[in-house]
């Protein structure tokens, strides 16, 4: 919450990370909503089952976005999409562990997902970045609304922005910085500069 207090003016979306939701419960969304009433929230639930029920939990406390794993069963995806439509929310399909991101991505969009998120898992971030998969997905689905997450920071933001993602998730590079607000501002400036070129 201390970091969020410093960076909230410089971010468009506040992500409730999976560990935070495990630790504090989805009620943390209401707490953040009270402190930052204009904030747009994403609940990184990584839904894998009970799609409608689990997505509804987040939408009902004011989250605009939820994440569902792209490897989930189609019925689960249908449930998440149905909940989003009822609540006026949006669905981000997390492409972790999807073997063919282009083929599955095309299908997920047809099922009603709003974004495809190229996500390098936390445990893999020392070994890889999401850039190669992001490029492959952008080439295969040139008009798809993409999100990207995992190990993104000041050294990688320019190469990421060249693939025109709609959403860029930056966690540790901001939260673990000595001056989180300064890093958030620099990232925003670099992103805006790339969008103009």
Image (cartoon, helix red, strand yellow):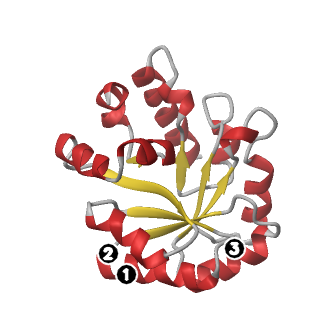
| Residue at mark 2 to residue at mark 3: CA–CA distance | 22 Å
Q: Is residue 16 visible?
A: no
Residue 22: give x, y in percent of width and height: 45, 47
Q: Is residue 182 visible?
A: yes
| Residue at mark 1 to residue at mark 2: CA–CA distance | 5 Å
Is the residue under label 3 in contact with that under label 2 (CB below 8 Å)?
no
Residue appearing at x 68%, y 54% in the figure: 163
- Residue carrying label 3: 105
Q: Above or below — where is 156 with respect to 107? A: above
State which quadrant residue 107 falls in. bottom right
- Label 3 neighbourhood size at 10 Å, few (<14), some (14-19), many (20+)? many
**Which residue in the rendered view is the most extreme toward the top?**
178
- Residue carrying label 1: 85
- Label 2 neighbourhood size at 10 Å, few (<14), some (14-19), many (20+)? few
Q: Above or below — where is 27 with respect to 140? A: above
**Local SS, label 2:** loop
Q: Which mark is residue 153?
A: none
**Local SS, label 1:** helix
- Residue carrying label 2: 88
Return the disc, 1 or 3, that comes first in the chain's sequence: 1
Residue 12: give x, y in percent of width and height: 38, 47
| Residue nearest the observer in this picture, 102 or 96 | 96
Is the residue under label 2 in contact with that under label 1 (CB below 8 Å)?
yes
């Amino acid at each position: 919450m201390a970091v969020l207090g410093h960076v909230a003016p410089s971010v468009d979306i506040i992500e409730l990370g999976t560990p935070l939701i495990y630790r504090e419960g989805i009620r943390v969304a209401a707490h953040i909503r009270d402190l930052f009433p204009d904030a747009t929230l994403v609940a990184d639930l990584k839904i894998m089952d009970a799609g409608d029920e689990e997505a509804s939990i987040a939408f009902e406390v004011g989250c605009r976005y939820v994440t569902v794993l792209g490897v989930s069963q189609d019925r689960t995806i249908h449930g998440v999409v149905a909940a989003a439509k009822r609540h006026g929310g949006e669905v981000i399909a997390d492409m972790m562990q999807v073997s063919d991101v282009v083929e599955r991505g095309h299908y997920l969009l047809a099922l009603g997902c709003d974004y495809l998120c190229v996500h390098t898992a936390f445990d893999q971030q020392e070994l890889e970045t999401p850039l190669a998969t992001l490029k492959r997905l952008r080439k295969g689905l040139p008009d798809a609304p993409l999100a990207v997450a995992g190990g993104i920071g000041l050294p990688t933001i320019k190469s990421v922005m060249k693939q025109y993602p709609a959403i860029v998730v930056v966690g540790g590079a901001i939260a673990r910085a000595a001056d989180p607000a300064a890093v958030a501002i620099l990232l925003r400036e670099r992103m805006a500069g790339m969008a103009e070129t």
